[in-house]
Image (cartoon, rainbow, N blue to C red):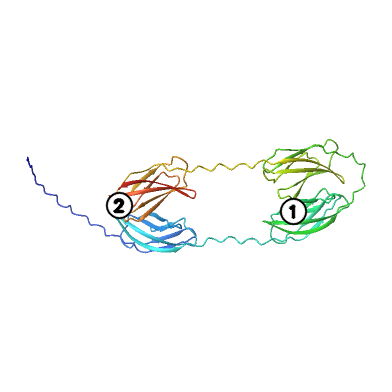
Amino acid sequence: RLGPVSTDAVTAPVPPEEEQPSQPRLGELTASHVTPTSVQLDWTVPEGTFDSFTVQYKDAQGQPQVLPVDGESRTVTVPDLVPSRRYKFNMYGVWGRKRLGPISTDAVTALAPSQEEPPSQPQLGELTASHVTPTSVQLEWTVPEGTFDSFTMQYKDAQGQPQVLPVDGGSRTVTVPDLVPSRRYKFNVYGVWGRKRLGPVSTDAVTAPVPPEEEQPSQPRLGELTASHVTPTSVQLDWTVPEGTFDSFTVQYKDAQGQPQVLPVDGKSRTVTVPDLVPSRRYKFNMYGVWGRKRLGPISTDAVTALAPSQEEPPSQPRLGELTASHVTPTSVQLEWTVPEGTFDSFTVQYKDAQGQPQVLPVDGGSRTATVPDLVPTHLYKFNLYGVWGQKRLGPIYTDAVT
């Protein structure tokens, strides 16, 4: 057995300690400025100073939430709450390695603002006829109460066929064209209000007789009707008039509900676009030419509206990559992560504090790093990171770190 070799040593004396600051004390926590989605918290510190504070509460889904606050603040607003819900808020003060508290308060968020009172049902007044000519009648009506989205004018032509003339909701007058002289017509006006059709209000009118005629030109002739520029909601019609001239034209067709529709066109036009159609539907269009008292035709064509444009491809589900810890201090850890595919709306970091209480740190979707504060030295922490995408929570990815 060889040795030993030995030596003596005297440990150094303890240096004179500085006077330790006295332990701070939390006062009272109160809630104010309560809205449907937020609560302002105010608190007092009657003695000493804290390094930082944390507010803890549970969200509407019962998940714990943590809101860090710097040590100089005495007020904070808790956002993203839901209306008419009771929340309990706990506040802790962090002083060195110690977490003091909590102090607590309850608050009930305000009611969601009530929706506006729905407008009262409008009312149709009186319908009158004026400016009567041999081939047209001007109609006027009143709306003593409320407003309508639109109106529809209905009557029967000289052949007894029902005709419909749409009118916008701001109008109070419309001229009905393409009538025949010396004929009695009954006109009905309906008001459209949301999904309701109110009315009708009605009036009769007799068109004026034809004045003594000059020598009539020869009767015009309709040629061919064709459809072009077909979209999901419209069709362009083109036609020819190989002989003579017409006073006007009318296009007739049935809409997707089977209701007859009439589109008046002036006599000089040779093209018109029929709007407000529905995609992938076959329509038959009839065109008449009006010449004096006569309605000539029809010429006809069929057209199938185009397919509705397909919706955009939904984005593919994003994917979380790797979570690592860096910049470790006695009281904080910086976390970094990757997103190799797609984008997230937000992230949440979950871990347990030194007392074993679950903590949640929300992070916005554009971030790839977050610093977790208010840790204690020489402690092993496990951090879980979740990605929020729409209504889904993906993950977690996780890592360990020792402060």
Q: Secondary structure at mark 1?
A: strand
Q: Place residue 246 in its image quadrant.
A: top right
Q: Are there few (<14), some (14-19), or many (20+) residues within 10 Å of tag 1?
A: some
Name the residue: 36% across, 62% down. 103
The residue indicated by pointer 1 is 152
The reply to whether callout 2 and callout 1 are in contact (CB within 8 Å) is no
The image shows residue 10 at horizontal and vertical percentages of: 11, 49
Q: Is 11 positioned to the left or the right of 220 in the image?
A: left
| Residue sticking out furthest to the top | 242
Say whether residue 338 is left or right of residue 332: right
- The image quadrant of residue 301 is top right
Q: Which residue is mark 2?
A: 376
Would you place residue 258 above or below residue 1 in this image? below
Residue 139, by quadrant, is: bottom right
* Amino acid type at image mark 1: Thr
Q: Residue at x 43, y 62 (%)?
A: 31
Residue situated in front as seen by the camera: 12 or 376? 376
Question: What secondary structure is found at the residue carrying circle 2?
Answer: loop
Residue 197 appears in the figure: yes
Q: Mark yes or no: residue 69 visible.
A: no
Q: Residues within 10 Å of mark 2 (few under 14, many from 20)?
A: many
Measured along the vertical axis of the image, is residue 264 above or below residue 192?
A: above
**Looking at numbered disc 2 in the image, what kind of residue is underneath it?**
Val
Residue 264 numbered tag: none
The residues bearing labels 2 and 1 have C-alpha atoms spaced at a distance of 75 Å
- Which quadrant: the N terminus? top left
Does residue 86 appear to the left or right of 16 in the view shown? right
Q: Position of residue 65 (x, y in %)?
A: 41, 55
